[in-house]
Each structure stands twice: as C-alpha cells, then as structure tokens.
C-alpha cells in the first residue's frame, strides 16, 4: 500500500483520532491531542490492558501514583545520573541529534562533522512551590514504574499479596526526547502501561519467559497479525541501567521494526536502591517459611500511543464496494471507538423518533453514534473509516415491523433484527 503511514495519519486528522496540539498556533513540538474518536480508542486500549493485567487475574493489583514525586526518588532510581541520551550537534547545519540514531551522518544535511557526544538527561525539570531554588526542583516522571516501587510496602500491607504478584499502573510519563517523531510513536508526553511483577529471586528467568509470551499474545489477540510482531532480545550494550535482560516486543511499522513494549528483568535493583536512599527496609517477609528477601522484578512496560498506532496501521484496509473504493479500519470490536451507529435511512420526521428510540435502547450498553445527515451510503463509509463494527438502519418498514437492519463492517452482511432483540444480537457478536 502506498505510504501507509501517511494514509493513517491523514485519516486520524480527518476523522478526529489525533490532532496536532495547539494547531491554531502552528502546533507544538511533536505533541498531539486525541479527538472524539481517538480518546475512545485510547481508552479502549487502556481498558483492554487493565482487563488483561488486573481484572482477569488474582495476582495483580493496580495503583495510580502522582506524576510529581520526591526528587530523591530519581536519584535512587538512577535516572538523575544515567537516564541520558548521547547528544551531538551537526557542525554544518547546527541540528541536534541522538548519536545512536544517525549512524554518523546528519539526516538533514548529510554532513559527518559532529561535536563530541555529551550526555543529555531526558527528565523534564520543574519547580514546586512559589519560590524557585535548588530545593524546589522536581521532575516530571519519565516512567510510571517508580511510583510502584516506592509504594511496594504500602501495597503489600494493604493487599496482603505475596510473591509472585504484580502492581500495575497506567499514566502519563514525560521525556525530553532529542528527536521525537513518527507521529505518536515518539513524543515528549506519552502514556505508559507498566506492571512490576515481584518474584522470588530464583524464579526471575521463568517469569520473564512467561511475560514475554503473555504480552505477545495480548497484541495478537487484539488483532495484530503475528507476522508483524517479533520479540527481540537486547544486546548487552543496549540494556537500561537497571536491567540484566530485556526483550522488546516489536511491530513492523511502515518505516521498519520499532519497539511497542519492553519486558525487562529489573532484578532487585529498584527496591534495593530505594531501601538505601530512604532508609526503609523494602523486603518481603514470608511468614510461612520465616524467610525475608528482596523480591526480583520482571516488568512489561508498554506505551499507549505506540500500540494505538500499531492497531491503526494493522487495521487500515481498502476494498471495493459497488465499484467504489472503500476505506475501513478492521479494528477488533473491543478497540473500536464506536461500537454501533444508528442511522435512519434518510432524514425524515417520521423516521427520527423511532431511530432515536433505538439509540436510547442501545446507549446504556454500547458506545453509539447517531447520524442522519447525507446519503446512507456515505454514512456507511464514514462509519467504516471510523472502524464501527455495526450500523443499525431504521427504515420505513421499521415503523410497521419494529425491526432494523444490522450491517456488518467486515462482511457487509445485513440482518433484519427486531428492536426487542437488538441488544442481545449485538452483544453476542461483539468480541
Ligand atoms: P525507545 O528505545 O524507543 O526510546 P525505551 O526503550 O526508552 O524506548 P522504555 O523505557 O522501555 O522505552 O519505556 C517503555 C515503553 O514506553 C516503550 O516500549 C514505549 O512503548 C513507551 N515509550 C517510551 N518512550 C516513549 C516516547 N518518547 N513516546 C511514546 N512512547 C514511549
């Protein structure tokens, strides 16, 4: 397909998935806003993750920690010292790059004349309180994980979980990326879905393998073709400062393989460091065996924007209906922003009340959209482009037989279903 990225980016803008942030001011440095369809898709991705990681398990609980944390957290975690990228300046065009991303050649002007690399810390600094001074510095968190580690004891005590068990969190993180780009793939403000799984040290490798499998399955279950996914082990020189082994779940984006999610063996690094810096014992005491130990951690850490982008790219399709090109998103039903569109056959005062009645029957159960302007054919196309799995059409026969036509996005099959049975009919068909 010719430039799939461009097709998807255009569709995102046109249909209200993603807008450039502050667009009326010319946009702002690779930041994006999610529009009416995008906010629903994003929420559905996050709900699917929460469902798989928390709701359907009895060994994982959730938290929602603050973005601003005690600055010592980031000293303990190693981020103040080592969360850096190597930054170089092109001496010819003055553009700034991440040295490890450009293979010695300036992507803008082709020059190979660079300043020596210097370490650039990716954390955003801010000040807390009305007076700016050394002691008022705080950071916007660059990962959600630390909010989990510092709450380890609170959660163990409150939830009475014992290893192996996990703590999950979704939320905003911030990194002052040197070269953001590829639409919502790399931005400076983004949302993460992270889970820290605390295990007895000897079981760390076993759980690492387990989570690699589980996380791959999550993406394929939600519709990413297995052939577009791979698991890639990090080379030793790629590993983050806290990891002894990491595998990335990668997706084949149109510009090449890129990371969707990292699964890392963080060992006891974080708990041990926080114990050192805070003076608190961060251990697990097993009452049954009388054993006291610092659990090891296996962490699947994914990004919401990156997976949204992968789901959109994998779902984009074009086919032909009645001799005309049709653009559609074959999104999994669970991810589709709108599940059901209610469409009166035409804008007609006799049809509207019944169509509205159908809408009100469906709204408590499904995210719906009501649309009565333009021809029915064009309204079907709009829903196909939004990835809506079902269109329910109210026509003049409905007024007599109390039945509607249900159209399937993928097969275009049309069923006549009575309004009384509509909720059950759709519910059976949604994944
Ligand atoms: P990369 O190598 O692409 O910079 P990373 O290895 O630094 O990513 P992690 O620290 O493992 O990323 O973060 C976990 C996940 O958070 C990533 O897999 C990705 O989905 C998401 N993520 C990280 N940085 C960004 C970003 N700048 N924009 C969007 N998502 C991000």
Image (cartoon, rainbow, N blue to C red):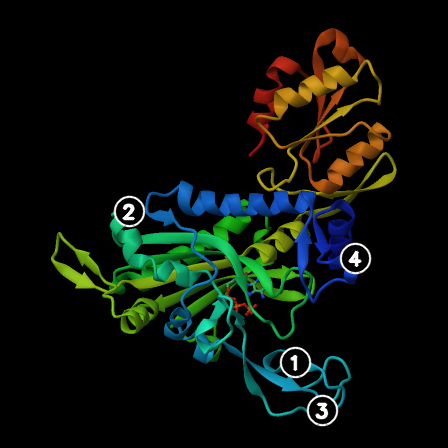
Residue identified by numbered label 1: 97
- Counting residues from the N terminus, which is met first, the one under dot 2 or under dot 1? 1
Closer to the eye: label 4 or 3? 4
Residue 43: which quarter of the image? top right
Q: Earlier in the sequence, mark 1 or mark 3?
A: 3
The residue singled out by tag 4 in the image is 24
Residue 166 place in picture, x, y as percent: 35, 53
Give the crowd class for mark 4: few <14, some 14-19, many >=20 residues within 10 Å: few
In the image: residue 343, left or right of residue 418: right
Query: Disc 2 versus disc 1: distance between alpha carbons?
Result: 46 Å
Q: Quadrant of the C terminus?
A: top right
Mark 2 vs 3, N-terminal side:
3
In 3D space, how far apart are the residues under numbered discs 1 and 4 (Cα atoms)? 28 Å
Q: Position of residue 347 (x, y in %)?
A: 84, 22
Residue at the disc numbered 2: 159
Q: Earlier in the sequence, mark 2 or mark 4?
A: 4
Name, please, the residue furthest toward the top: 400
């Amino acid at each position: 397909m010719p430039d799939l990225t461009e097709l998807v980016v255009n569709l995102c803008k046109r249909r209200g998935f993603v807008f450039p942030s502050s667009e009326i001011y010319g946009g702002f440095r690779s930041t994006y806003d999610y529009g009416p369809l995008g906010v629903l898709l994003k929420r559905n991705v996050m709900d699917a993750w929460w469902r798989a990681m928390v709701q359907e398990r009895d060994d994982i609980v959730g938290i929602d920690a603050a973005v601003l944390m005690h600055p010592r957290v980031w000293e303990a975690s190693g981020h103040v010292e080592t969360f850096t990228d190597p930054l170089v300046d092109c001496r010819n065009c003055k553009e700034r790059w991440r040295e490890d991303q450009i293979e010695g050649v300036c992507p803008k002007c082709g020059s190979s004349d660079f300043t020596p690399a210097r370490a650039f810390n990716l954390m955003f600094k801010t000040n807390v309180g009305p007076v700016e001074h050394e002691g008022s510095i705080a950071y916007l968190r660059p990962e959600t994980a630390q909010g989990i580690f510092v709450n380890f004891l609170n959660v163990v005590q409150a939830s009475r979980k014992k290893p192996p068990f996990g703590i999950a969190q979704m939320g905003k993180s911030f990194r002052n990326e040197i070269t953001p780009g590829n639409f919502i793939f790399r931005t400076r403000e983004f949302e993460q879905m992270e889970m820290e799984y605390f295990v007895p040290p000897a079981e760390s490798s076993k759980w690492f393998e387990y989570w690699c499998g589980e996380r791959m399955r999550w993406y394929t279950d939600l519709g990413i073709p297995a052939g577009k996914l791979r698991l890639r082990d990090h080379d030793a020189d790629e590993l983050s400062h806290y990891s002894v082994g990491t595998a990335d779940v990668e997706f084949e984006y149109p510009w090449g393989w890129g990371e969707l999610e990292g699964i890392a063996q963080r060992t006891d690094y974080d708990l041990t460091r926080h114990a050192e810096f805070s003076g608190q014992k961060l251990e697990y005491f097993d009452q049954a065996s009388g054993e006291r130990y610092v659990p090891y951690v296996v962490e699947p850490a994914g990004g919401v924007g990156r997976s949204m982008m992968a789901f959109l790219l994998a779902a984009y399709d074009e086919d032909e209906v009645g001799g005309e090109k049709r653009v559609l998103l074959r999104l999994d039903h669970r991810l589709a922003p709108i599940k059901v569109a209610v469409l009166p056959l035409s804008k007609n005062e006799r049809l509207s009340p019944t169509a509205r009645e159908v809408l009100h029957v469906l709204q408590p159960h499904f995210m719906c959209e009501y649309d009565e302007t333009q021809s029915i054919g064009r309204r079907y196309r709009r829903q196909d482009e939004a990835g809506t799995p079902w269109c329910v059409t109210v026509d003049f026969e409905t007024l007599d037989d109390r039945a509607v036509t249900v159209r399937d996005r993928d097969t275009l099959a049309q069923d006549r279903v009575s309004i009384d049975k509509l909720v059950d009919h759709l519910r059976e068909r949604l994944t």
